[in-house]
Amino acid sequence: MIFKRLELQNFRNFDNEVLEFDNGMNIIYGQNAQGKTNILESLWLFTGAKSFRGSKDSELVKFDAVKAKIKLDFYDDGRDQDCVINIEKSRNAVLNGVEYSSASAIAGKIYAIVFSPNDLNIVKDGPVHRRKFMDTCLCQLYPKYISTSRRYLKALDQRNSILKNLKFNPNMEEFIVDFEKELAVTGSEIIGYRKRYIEAINKFLSKIYNGLSDGKEEISAEYETTAGDNEAEFLVALKNSRYEDMQTLSTSVGPHRDDLIIKINGISARSFGSQGQKRSAALGLKLSESAVISEVTGKTPVALLDDVMSELDTSRQNYILNHIKGWQVFLTCCDISNTEGLKNGKIFEIENGKLKQK
Ligand SMILES: Nc1ncnc2c1ncn2[C@@H]1O[C@H](COP(=O)(O)OP(=O)(O)OP(=O)(O)O)[C@@H](O)[C@H]1O
Ligand SMILES: [Mg+2]
């Protein structure tokens, strides 16, 4: 998948801008608040997803305008294609001349991954962020994962509400058994998906991280479950935790409590990693996600890397600039000296919503 040309009209702080991209590396640089992230955000919208900043559609329209239009020319499936997104209070999309009533209907046609400074939380914060990292990609790739997760969450809700009533009505314990069975069936399916996903991630992660750290560091990611190794073990774990769960009024075992343990040179990246190591690990996970999507769908997502260079030393920066092979990359940075090692590609300078190619 190659993004060739982007047109922005009244999008965020842009009036009318056109960018023609390089097939490999595209650097967008400028001072703070000039519109760098806005460009990545506009590209991301072509995936059909909402803004990665969580903004409302109406916030994407330039302050003094009524509507915005963004157009992407891209190459995929062996031919040139184009997609237009019109934004007012909501978005609609026109893909190769065919109109879609909502922009989310084009999901699955154009693939991208985004790395933003927030993604550091995958490595440095609580397990909820690592579960979200796995779930987001699995939901994109497998509709069955979405339906199974819904069933799991429903059963979890039901077990938790029985836990709340059990104190006053011990007869209700017989009902909990059915929900625990449903939790064990759906939960072990979720865990299976996640374990296979992490196996797939690991195939790419060690190579990418090794490159980033110039062969000096090793990384590993391992799924850690609270639910045992299979459906039967999960069922036993649920039964064994019932009394304790009655005290906390929540279910203490299951994929909703699982974690992904990321280690650098054998020790926890979360507890002991330096800033640069954490950033490299988060970036490695995101790029590996992209590689897995590519393996499963046959399409190579473009990589949108927002502010990834800060805190990285020159050798890590050079790896990003020159060694992410086979992907088209869009990378923002404030400091042009960070890109001195760039061998091929295009550099765009941005000032107050106006672009010039260097
Ligand atoms: N709807 C809008 N209309 C006009 N301007 C907007 C709109 N939304 C955001 N902006 C402006 O865009 C600018 C921020 O752009 P952006 O977040 O892309 O900056 P950036 O270059 O990535 O900066 P940083 O280096 O700090 O991350 C802000 O000055 C903001 O006021
Ligand atoms: Mg920014």
Image (cartoon, rainbow, N blue to C red):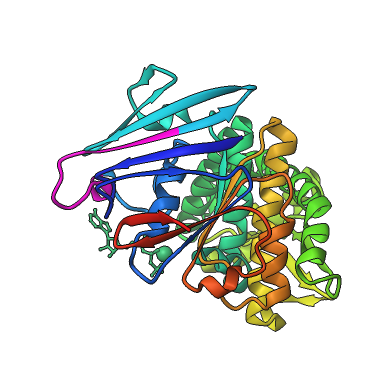
Q: Is residue 98 visible?
A: yes
Q: In this view, does 143 lie to the left or right of 7?
A: right
Image x and y of residue 87, in percent: 27, 37
Where is residue 189 drawn, in percent x and y? 71, 40
Q: Where is residue 260 in the image (x, y as percent from the top left)?
A: 70, 62
Highlighted magenta segment, given as a residue range? 58-72
Q: Which residue is drawn at 52% across and 44% down?
A: 21
Q: Nearer the viewer, residue 229 or 313?
A: 313
Judge from the rendering whether residue 319 lies leftward or rightward of residue 74; answer left or right: right
Q: In this view, does 299 lie above or below 119?
A: above
* 65 in magenta: yes
Residue occupying image coordinates x 79% and y 46%: 200
Q: Which residue is drawn at 68% across and 31% down?
A: 297
The front one of 85 and 354 is 354
Q: Position of residue 41 (x, y in %)?
A: 41, 50
Left or right of 64: which side holds 209?
right
- Image quarter hosting the N terminus: top right
